[in-house]
Image: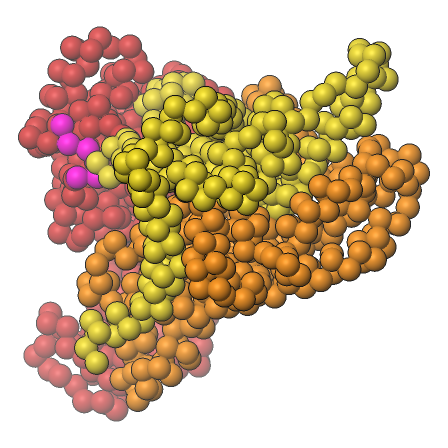
Amino acid sequence: MSPRQRAWVLSAPALLLVIVFLGLPVLSTLATTFGDPKGPFHQYAAFFDSKLRMRVLWRTLEVALVTTAVSLFVGFVTAWVVSKAPARIKSLLIIAAVFPLLTGVVVRSFAWLVILGKNGIVNETLLRLHLISEPLNMLYTQFSVTIAMIYLFVPLMILTLVGVLEGIPQDLTDAAASLGAKPAAAFRQVVLPMAVPGLIVGSVLVFTGSFTSYATPQLLGGERQMMMGTFLYQRAMVTFDWVGASTIAAVMVVVTLVTVLIMSKLAQRLNPVAG
Amino acid sequence: MKTKTHPLLIAFAALVFAFLIGPLIIIIGASLSDSSFLTFPPRGLTLHWYENVFAISAFPRTMWTSFQLAVGGTALSMCIGIPAAYAMARYRIQLPRFLGNIYVLPILIPEIVLGFSLMKSMAIGMDMPIMASLMIGHALIVLPYCVRVVGASLNSFDFSIEEAAISLGCPRWKAFFTVVLPNVRAGIIAGFILAFITSINDVSVSIFLTGPGVSTLPIQILAHMEQFFDPTIASVSVLLMFVTVAVMAVVERTLGLTFLTK
Amino acid sequence: MTVSLSLEQITAHYGATKVLEDLSLHVGEGELVSLLGSSGCGKTTTLRLVAGFLEPTSGAIKLGERDLTRLPAHARDIGLVFQTYALFPHLTVRDNVAFGLKQRKVATAERNRRADDMIERVGLGHLADRYPANLSGGQRQRVALARALVIEPPLLMFDEPLSNLDAKLRVDMRVEIRRLQQANGTTALYVTHDQEEAFSISDRVAIMNAGQIMQLDTPEVLYSRPANAFVADFVGFENMIPMRAIGEAGDAVRAEMAGGATLDFPKSQFTVPSQDFVLATRPEGLAVSTTDWGIPATLGLRTYLGRAYQYQCTTPAGEVKANGPLSAPYDEGLHVNLIPLPEQCCLLPAASA
């Protein structure tokens, strides 16, 4: 066997798995959306005409963008503190960030049901302080979905950005200082520009993750705060409108892929090391 | 000796970590509460809800299914992912560049879309048994971790060591198992851990593929919650947190916790 | 503006570990002093203390009249060339060089003019708009040098600046560094583990070990007259033969070595420093001879060095290396005497070993 043949034989099982069980099924999902007798784009026209569907799309985009923005800010500041912490404390903090990340989405979303519920800690506290006279309805609102989503993604952002900040060599900030840059100037002129590609990567992870999430909006948003993921599931498994579900799937795929492509191009352009 | 971090930033980070850990502590508290609805802080303490987890037969059954899927799916994925990663690292010039991107498609495509598409093609189109389609689905979603993480190890592996073994008379396949694999062990362990965690926590793919009689633990939790809102769920969640602790202990023992920063 | 640098009784710790002990060093105006030693000897720590990246536990650092000891790094006004060059990857060559001027609030036009002048001076005029990723190692080194020089600092410091370059480039660059440093008359502190580099570039060299300066002198003195066994070993005195003075023999001091053989050192040529001492030489400092004065030895393996033959010799005091003339190759097993050549031997006090 030539090395070329050997390489392909070794790659074949994995390629087959992806092609047969991902490529073909997803393509067939996308293909069904163009099969409408009223014309290939009828499903999309219907999607963008429907107030309900557009509201779901906008809500999902809004939640994803807010989640991304808040996670980015919170994650960056926290990652900065973590990366500057003494080694012992640093590894403790990293464990504290990894632990929630490794704990499942269902468990972590469930925690917010307990916190924000009628008898939850927030309502109990507010009642006891006589700030409110009867429990607030915080569940099944855009707020409850967003806060749980932020909770879900902050650890990911922290860990990504700690990696980014640690990847900036100490020598560079030392060099900036030796050339007369005060700490704030060194941060602005050296650290921040070098962290930008990492900030973009982290944002893409959080945006696509929250845009396509299912479990969290299901638990904390329910029927009332439908998002793209729960909407797809509802269309597919409750109303059995598979073509409609496929259209939602297609919109999700396009939004995700376009975001990933544009942002990774941007990150590449802004990446100083690639020149 | 180092520049000091501003106290306001430290206070902010402390709040963030309280925000990260607090909800998990609340779950632990809720799981021990003796009231029949979810509440925190608990009024009286009981282990009743933990007994209840095992009294409801669906929980132990789905735990076992989830475990089988996590181990089986990851093992399957490793068996086909390691050769692919090896081919990419060893025969870099012989294979087109984009192959690496194909293996990460399961992460790139929204999971919920993947789940829906798999249901249509496998469960309905091919009429596959539930367990088989779940196994394939899980192998698929963990494939990126297997290929990428093992691949990273293989990329830093010096293949002249393998050539040395072959020149000393070791057959090619034997050299792979006795020389290459032991040297990328850390990558395999790391990939296995990430894959295991991904699989055991998966919702979006499993929710489409589970069916009558066969479910996974996260799906069972969701189903239980639709009907009952009692501390049993908190107890299951705590048990799942133990899995996380166990995984982190394994990471600590085998790779060191510094692995987690990468 | 030429000033001198003084380190006064500096002690420094990393956590609980003491890395420098009571170290004092004076670098005169316009002088280039190297800190030379193996890794962990404290040379880089010394440099980082002067740069302000570390703070000493006690002691003072002065640059001319200015006390730097507690000044933050960005206020010290020192040009520093890093081992890794530490070029800002997101900035062009010009912006890298102009970075220090920008911090000093030099106006843009003036800043770019001065940066371009300096880039021209290090021979990179055509690369000013490139990014560091697109430069060779030698070019990066020049940018790092230009960046440190353009702020016209009263003190230049170099942290193993050439260790990432290949051998030929290293020689070229060190000539260039020396040329630029002398042209500006800037005081300089240079850290390296490479003896040839330190000796070739420096006015004076401090050989360091375990957080202390073992000897500070001109390269010539260090090379031929090491003050102690550590420095002797460091500069290549391969033979170290312990001796003990046991009496006088006319105009000579008679010494006994391990194994019982004795040797008379004429007082006119040798100064015996203490009763117990060490005869330290390079192989060329021991001449293989068939006359009857010297250290008795049996010749072993002979190797050809081009300028001489070298012999592995067995003496009562152990194995030593000695050189013999090209004109008379001796055979293995021959009994000879090894004659210490006064101008190439040092007698060092044993306590220093």
Residue placed most toward the observer, A222 or B236: A222
**Percent position of residue B97, x then y:** 23, 55
Q: Left of B133 or right of it: where is C305?
A: left
- Whether C133 is among the magenta residues is yes
- Which chain is represented by yellow in the image? A
Q: Magenta stretch: give its range.
A: C129-134
**Percent position of residue C228, x then y:** 40, 54
The single residue placed furthest to the right in the displayed view is B44
Is C313 drawn above or below residue A53 in the view shown? below
Q: Residue at x 32, y 33 (%)?
A: A42
Q: Chain C is which colour? A: red
Is C197 drawn above or below residue C144 in the view shown? below
Q: Residue at x 38, y 29 (%)?
A: A46
Q: Residue at x 31, y 40 (%)?
A: A37
The single residue placed furthest to the bottom in the displayed view is C333
The part of the image, by quadrant, that contains residue A239 is: top right
**Percent position of residue A193, x then y:** 34, 27
Is C42 drawn above or below residue A51 in the view shown? below
**Percent position of residue C270, x then y:** 31, 60
- Viewport quadrant of the C terminus of chain A: top left
Q: Is residue C246 visible?
A: yes
Q: Left of A16 or right of it: where is A108?
A: right
Residue placed most toward the observer, C150 or A228: A228
- Which chain is represented by orange in the image? B
